[in-house]
Each structure stands twice: as structure tokens, then as C-alpha cells.
């Protein structure tokens, strides 16, 4: 397996499964009764635990104020997204099958932002990316109306 394929598996396919199971555990948690605040605290404790384990296994301890600030904001916006998913599932009783499909459109937003902010349009095949983007949009519309 070449490094590009391995990178796609490690950085794309495996996270997709982890995020999918995260949604399942979130839905199960809302179904069995948990407050949003305690849910977020427990979620945060799990993230801290994984961070401590990762910190011990990977020798690179590089950090700057800028990189730390960016990491903080990555976690901050991720936490708010997680809270909003929780609210959609618990307060509005949306089915996870619809929520997960809509949340999956984050790939579209991430791809467009990466093209612009990191000038990745120089590294990728933009026509294929645009076709994939259109498929994601169509999929999002279909899932929202399901």
C-alpha cells in the first residue's frame, strides 16, 4: 500500500468510522437521558484522556502560541458542533440517519475552505472536486428531505 492510499485510509476512512460511531453513541446517550452540560463535560474528559495517551506515544512535542491557539479554536468549534448535534437529536428528536447525512456535508465546507485558505486548488484536480461537491450537495438535499 503506497503512502497516499495509506494516508487516505488513516486520515479519511478510519476517521469517518470513528465519527459515525460517535454519532451513534451520542444518539444512544440522548435516548437514555443525559443533560447537555454533563454530556459535554464527559465528552471533553474523553478527549483529554485520548490527548494524554497520544502525548505519551508520539515523541514530537512541538508547540507555539500560534499553533496552540489554532488547536484551541479547532476544539472550540468542534465542541459547539457536537453540542448542536446533541440538541438536534435530543430537543428536536431528529433521527440520527438524517443528522449524520447533513453533518457529512462538512466535507464540502472543509474542501472549499482548504481550496481558498491553503491554496490547495494548486494540488488537486478541481473538476473532480467540483463534481464530488455537487454529489455531496445533492446527497444533503436528499437526506434533509428523507
Image (cartoon, rainbow, N blue to C red):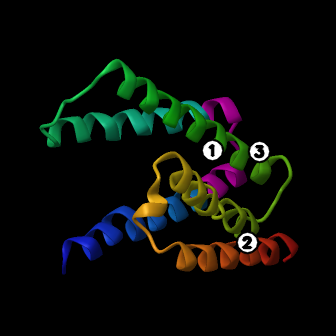
Magenta-highlighted residues: 25-39
The quadrant in which the C terminus is found is bottom right
Query: Measured along the vertical axis of the image, is residue 21 above or below residue 65?
Result: below
- Report the disc number at residue 82: 1
- Element type where label 3 sits in the image: helix
Marks 2 and 3 sit apart, C-alpha to C-alpha, by 23 Å
State which mark lies toward you, 2 or 1: 2
Q: Nearer the viewer, residue 119 or 99?
A: 119
Q: Nearer the viewer, residue 97 or 114?
A: 114
- Report the disc number at residue 121: none
- Report the disc number at residue 137: 2
Q: Is residue 31 left or right of residue 104?
A: right
Q: Nearer the viewer, residue 2 or 26?
A: 2
Residue in the picture at 58% in, 62% down: 107
In the displayed image of the protein, which residue is found farthest to the top? 65
Residue in the picture at 42% in, 38% down: 47
Query: Measured along the vertical axis of the image, is residue 58 above or below residue 20?
Result: above
- Element type where label 1 sits in the image: helix
Q: Is residue 91 left or right of residue 49?
A: right
Whether tag 3 and tag 1 are in contact, CB under 8 A, the answer is: no
Query: Measured along the vertical axis of the image, is residue 86 above or below residue 8?
Result: above
Image coords of residue 35 (percent x, y): 70, 35
User: Callout 1 environment at 10 Å: few (<14), some (14 to 19), or many (20+)?
Assistant: some
Q: Is residue 47 left or right of residue 111?
A: left
Which tag, 3 or 1, sits closer to the chain's start? 1
Q: Nearer the viewer, residue 94 or 128?
A: 128
Which tag, 2 or 3, sits closer to the chain's start? 3
Residue 5: which quarter of the image? bottom left
Q: What residue did someone put label 3 on? A: 87
Residue in the picture at 60% in, 57% down: 112
State which mark lies toward you, 2 or 3: 2
Marks 2 and 1 sit apart, C-alpha to C-alpha, by 21 Å
Amino acid at each position: 500500500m503506497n503512502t497516499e492510499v495509506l494516508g487516505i485510509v488513516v486520515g479519511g476512512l478510519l476517521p469517518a468510522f470513528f465519527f459515525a460511531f460517535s454519532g451513534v453513541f451520542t444518539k444512544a446517550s440522548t435516548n437514555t437521558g443525559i443533560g447537555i452540560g454533563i454530556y459535554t463535560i464527559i465528552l471533553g474528559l474523553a478527549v483529554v484522556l485520548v490527548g494524554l495517551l497520544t502525548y505519551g506515544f508520539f515523541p514530537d512535542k512541538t508547540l507555539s502560541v500560534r499553533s496552540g491557539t489554532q488547536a484551541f479554536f479547532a476544539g472550540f468549534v468542534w465542541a459547539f458542533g457536537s453540542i448542536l448535534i446533541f440538541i438536534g437529536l435530543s430537543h428536536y428528536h431528529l433521527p440520527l440517519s438524517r443528522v449524520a447525512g447533513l453533518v457529512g456535508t462538512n466535507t464540502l465546507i472543509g474542501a472549499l475552505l482548504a481550496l481558498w485558505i491553503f491554496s490547495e486548488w494548486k494540488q488537486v484536480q478541481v473538476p473532480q472536486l467540483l463534481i464530488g461537491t455537487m454529489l455531496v450537495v445533492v446527497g444533503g438535499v436528499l437526506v434533509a428531505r428523507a
